[in-house]
Amino acid sequence: MQVMQAGESDRKELFDRGWRFSLGNLENAHQAVYDDSSWRLLNLPHDWSVEPLKEQIPGETIGPFSKKSPGGAATGQTLGGEGWYRKTFVISPEDAGKRHELYFEGIYNQSEIWVNGRKVHYNVYGYSTFRFDITPFCNSAGQENVIAVRVINEGKNSRWYTGSGIYRHVWMIRTSPSHIDDWGTFITTNRIADNQADVSLTATVVNGNDSATDFEVRIELVSPTGKTVSKATQSTKVASRDTLEIPFHLQVKKPRLWSTETPDLYTSRISLWKDGTRLDEVAIPFGIRTISFSVENGFELNGVKTKLKGGCVHHDNGLLGSAAFDRAEERKVEILKKNGYNAVRGSHNPMSESFMSACDRLGMLVIDEAFDQWRGKKNPQDYHLYFDEWSAKDIRALVLRDRNRPSVIMWSIGNEIRERITDEGRETAGYLKNEILKYDRTRPVTAGVNKHWDKDRKNMLPLDNAFHHLDVAGYNYMWRFYEEDHAKYPQRIIFGSESVATEASHNWDMVEKHPYVIGDFIWTAMDYLGESGIGNSLEVDPEENVHQFMSWPWFNGWCGDIDLLGVKKPQSYYRDVLWHERKISMAVEVPVAEGKIRKVSFWGWPEERLSWTFPGMENRRLKVNVYTRAPKVRLYLNNVLVEEKIVNEQYKASFEVPYQEGTLKAVEVDDNKEGASTVLATAGEATGLRVTADKTRLSADGQDLSYVWIELVDKKGNVVYDSQRKIQIASEGDGACIIASGTASPNDMASFQSLTPTLFNGRAMVIIRSDYHPGKMRLTVASDGIKTSAINLNTK
């Protein structure tokens, strides 16, 4: 039971701790008197679809995966179902007269919420943030209150892994009956000139009194260093039980501008006063920055031309499923930034607040996307069933939640919408755009639009209706049409809203060549659960067909630049060259058996390794691919020149090299002068397991995470690309616990969420979650024939 503590700092209190959970259809579980003592006790965020199934049936289930999954390969062979959550809390006497609001960042999928046995809310969109006043349903201060949440995730309702349950944070918001509506606050930068920023701010006051009331609203803008840089005050009268928007215009001298390189955040402190007493205060972070879009200059951030080095990102966190821990979401953005990305497209739904906040803090531009379907269905039980009733509510929630974020540069109303070329689709796009404009007119509206073929798939049909209402046109897999469409529609601003790795150079060349093409977003930046095997690269018989999706036991899309653990794949090194992040990269294609060929899917990449270790392949000719923008490349094996080659238009030169152990070195050549180089060396025999953690000190808040790498290495510390060795993971102590472990393999189900995984390319990972009390934990990793390794973690 949670006892609510009074205090100014507790206006918005994290409500994740101490929930009880039961999986299955239950009668009367919404009633306050229901006995839930036998239910599992857990702390949010929680995703039951990623947890191992209780009944493991040989040949039918492995861990969380089941051949009875309604979504099959699309949703990663996982199950949904029905689940119940319950939590008790007590309002303190000091808070007896306050307003209490429940704030859910996301529940997948349909959810019903009861307070003390009375139904208070219903929500249908699993990605939508929603909130509601529960004050009328709560018992008197000092008495126990019961919240019950029913969650249903049934049928075929998605094209990717969704997760199930209360997978994002829950908050309790306590305010005076008269208060500031935080979602009613809108902060914009109007102009930056002469070393001064003109900032507009609208504050919304809610009068909870039965009579018209005089209030005072105070604004204080605080710099990233904590210094107050601007103030304003207004007095106003608000009618009984009414709300009122109050506009402010402020100036900030010598502003620190938010950008991808310097993501400086200011804070707006808005307080509500009556007769000298402060009734409420909110603190809202924001960035001072300007954005503009034009065919002449493309996208400009603070007046600086900026090409969008983008990636599409699904919402899951790999081994954690869809659970949106702050640290998991932050780490995702850190990895993307480290690998050259400056923009992401949330695909194809609102992302978590934790992810969005990380983008604000770390300097990642965001295309904030609402829907994957409108009225036209893609699956029988998807959002099309609810679009007419709920789309306006969900658009409102998205825009009000995120419109103060400097990271958000565009609103996307949809992706590959079925009815996109019809008159009805054009009308719907206009309706959604107008809903956005009710709450924000500072950003353009876009969508991801793909080709539309006639019924015989011979002719591509016009996309005029799909693009009609878009301020910026998102093209999915259509780089070949950029120049042709620009000639027809010279004022159209274009970006590649989705593209594939094998066409990366074509897409990026268009971005660099034409200012009206403002960026490119790869499908995808990171691997994700579901759309299983869409990026496959298979060794097959020449006559064998390869399907778009891979069936059991595939569960991972396998099309990302970065794998499920966060390891950079060879295709990402190629992208580094395209984005001028590195001069040269090299990879070796994994050879196929005699009589076999390799078939690569549209979203795939040839099976390459960043390694020159192929035991048993001595003297067999291996294909070595070198990527560079230099005109020529020289390749050396053990300091002997193999060959010099001209680099092709895709910035690639390929060599056939008889394998022998040693060192492979590729060197740029320009005007007969050697430049940057890259080296692959043969690894030795595995001698141990290297165990490293991104942090060894955790906060005792029940939310902190440590990501622990496990790598098979030789005596020099080189990773040995072994995908056969099993390891054993164990822990002892307290203060933290293992919540996930496994590998990046797209089809080794037995190694997902396992304490005895088989290494994949020499690697595995363990994710540790802190507890709510201090303690020490020791993690041990063992494998036959090599020395056991361990690492200590402290929670304080």
Image (tube, helix red, strand yellow):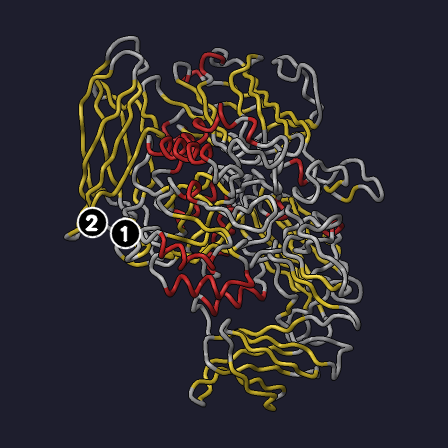
Q: Which residue is mark 1?
A: 257
Badge 1 amino acid: Leu
Q: In the picture shown, does residue 481 fall above or below 424?
A: below
Badge 2 amino acid: Ile
Instruction: Tell me the CA gap for discs 2 and 1.
Output: 9 Å
Q: Earlier in the sequence, mark 2 or mark 1?
A: 2
The quarter of the picture where residue 45 lies is top right
- Outermost right residue: 58
Q: How many marks?
A: 2
Looking at the image, do the residues carrying marks 2 and 1 touch, with CB atoms under 8 Å apart? yes
Q: Where residue 582 sits in the image (x, y, percent)?
A: 46, 71
Residue 727 relative to residue 41: left or right: right
| Image quadrant containing the N terminus | top right
Q: Disc number at residue 418?
A: none
Q: Viewer-proximal residue, 787 or 291?
A: 291
- Please say whether residue 730 is visible from this viewpoint: no
Q: Secondary structure at mark 2?
A: strand
- Please say whether residue 263 is visible from this viewpoint: yes
Q: Where residue 72 sits in the image (x, y, percent)?
A: 71, 41
Residue 753 relative to residue 523: left or right: right
Q: Where residue 625 sits in the image (x, y, percent)?
A: 59, 75
Q: Which residue is mark 2?
A: 192
Q: Residue at x 54, y 38 (%)?
A: 418
Q: In the picture shown, does residue 156 fall above or below 101?
A: below
